Amino acid sequence: MEALHAKGYVEPLRTYIASGKPIMGICVGMQVLFQGSDESPGVLGLGVVPARVGSFLPEDAHGRKAVPHMGWSLASVVDVKDESIDSKSRGSESTSSRQQLGTSYGLPVTEPAHFYFVHSFRVAYDESIAPWTLTTTQYGSETFVSSIQHGNVFATQFHPEKSGQAGLNLLAAWLHLDDAALHATKDARIRRPMATHERMPTRRIVACLDVRSNDDGDLVVTKGESYNVRERQPAEGQAKSTADGTIRSGGKAQVRNMGKPVELAQRYYEEGADEIAFLNITSFRNWALGDQPMLSLLNVAAATIFVPLTVGGGIRDFTDPDGTFHPALEVAHAYFRAGADKVSIGSEAVYAVEQLLQRATELGDCTGDPCAAPAMALRGDTGIEQIAHKYGVQAVVVSVDPKRVYLSDQEIDGLSDEHSSGDGPVDARTHPHASSIVCGQDERPETAGQSARWWYMCTVKGGRESRDIDVVQLARGVERLGAGELLINSIDRDGSYAGFDEKLIDLVRGCVNIPVIASSGAGCADHFCDVLASRPAARGAPIEAALAAGIFHRREVSIMDVKKRCADAGYPVRMS
């Protein structure tokens, strides 16, 4: 709205709406139609709808829930009643009116469709805006307006352009509305929310494509084992292995090629992936704005794939050879224009939290907790802050690459008696990364199965360099800076087929309020069910999404196999 006011578009928009010509808004395009929003308290909205936009509660009567609300939720067409009709006839009239209303806008009534949402602010339903309400959606115990319709005005809180076939049906219906349907109104009609059995979004199954250039310069999808993406078997006619067991040709092993990025992404969309992520795993070496093949890839993929696309790699400040400075925001902008819906930040997020902690220390805070850092430590100069301010927190994903650091017997002996065993928190005075220490079974080959303690150290540059910062500090730090989602990888479990690292996932889920995607280690459909289960260590909050790559690339497990298994286990999933 600030931009609309600044550019003088407010009155022309109001005039256009008053003319009766059709208008449609999506997400923030719906919210600007209201009187104002808690997101920008001093800024007036268009004032077309007599209500304000408020924020979601991170905890309500049904427990903790992540904010932003991110994922696929049901949009239920309101119950329509005409008070001028006698009660005996009202039941059938209500059903037919509701059916007619839904059909006009491509919204199924008997079996509501799932649509993709990504927002932190919402319009709570109440009777004052009933005449405007077309669909409502439930998030925890909050019922909010997910689409509005009144005369020529139609708007959705969800993203139909990212909601697969259901969204395409809605857009087609709106584009083909006849004039009579567009302007038909009945003042006597009362619209009320319909009850729904789904209070939370479906669990998302995300397909990931690790993209890089091979040694011939072609952009390929690859897959690593503990982040090593080069083959261990020689191609025919090429060099055999060296003494260290690595296969080399011209001094290098071949990059493992799993296929062409756009073709694989299209396949995953058609197989039912809820989101697709492209991660440029070698971009830390190069400037992202110079990576035209990656930008072209996004352009082509976005033209035929109608679910959210996340892209990561190289989103950082950069100075080119002629001395021109390019901020991370400029890189993100290029990705968004090319078709990305979210950007994923990796190494730069680690550096940003290190900087935040350093500034906090200089200002007198020595807790090591980014959430305790004084407000003056946040200066708006990191890529996370700038992108979140421009595009919203929901557009910023932080991809975390942690690895286990096992405690020695001496370090364990140094813990206080109260915390030297069990799975409880460790006193911060006894270990610098106490908040990240967990207890479980050792997975190192020489001591596998024994009881052990370890903490999770964060890495940068694709896992190649370790930093003295733990995963809890990073997770809480990037949330403070403005990240809207976390992608939690595991160097130890990558390519292992051993299942997700639930200790790691629970640790992160329990310390933040933003959505969490579990990644690394999936070997079968049951592993997805295991990680999606709510556990006390995560403070009862569910994991919103789980991601896999290799098992989908190799067709060892299909996306629909995973969804069917999750549905059988009682987890809501999008099946169409």
Image (cartoon, rainbow, N blue to C red):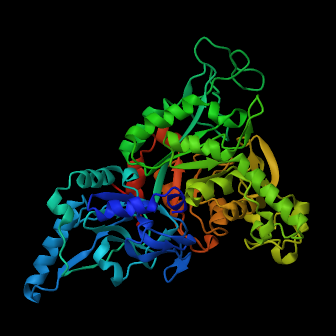
Q: Would residue 70 be seen by someone viewing this image from the given angle? A: no
Relative to 537, does residue 252 appear above or below in the rendering?
A: above
Picture residue at 43% right of the left edge, 32% below the top: 263
Picture residue at 80% right of the left edge, 64% below the top: 377
Q: Nearer the viewer, residue 150 or 314?
A: 150
Residue situated furthest top in the rendering: 237
Relative to 49, does residue 458 appear above or below in the rendering?
A: above
Image-based side of 194 in relation to 257, left or right: left
Q: Position of residue 295 (x, y in %)?
A: 54, 34
* Residue 414, picture quadrant: bottom right
Q: Would residue 145 be seen by someone viewing this image from the given angle? A: yes
Q: Nearer the viewer, residue 72 or 489?
A: 72
* Residue 145, picture quadrant: bottom left
Q: Position of residue 209 (x, y in %)?
A: 53, 39
Picture residue at 28% right of the left edge, 62% below the top: 19
Picture residue at 58% right of the left edge, 71% below the top: 535
Image-based side of 386 in relation to 63, left or right: right
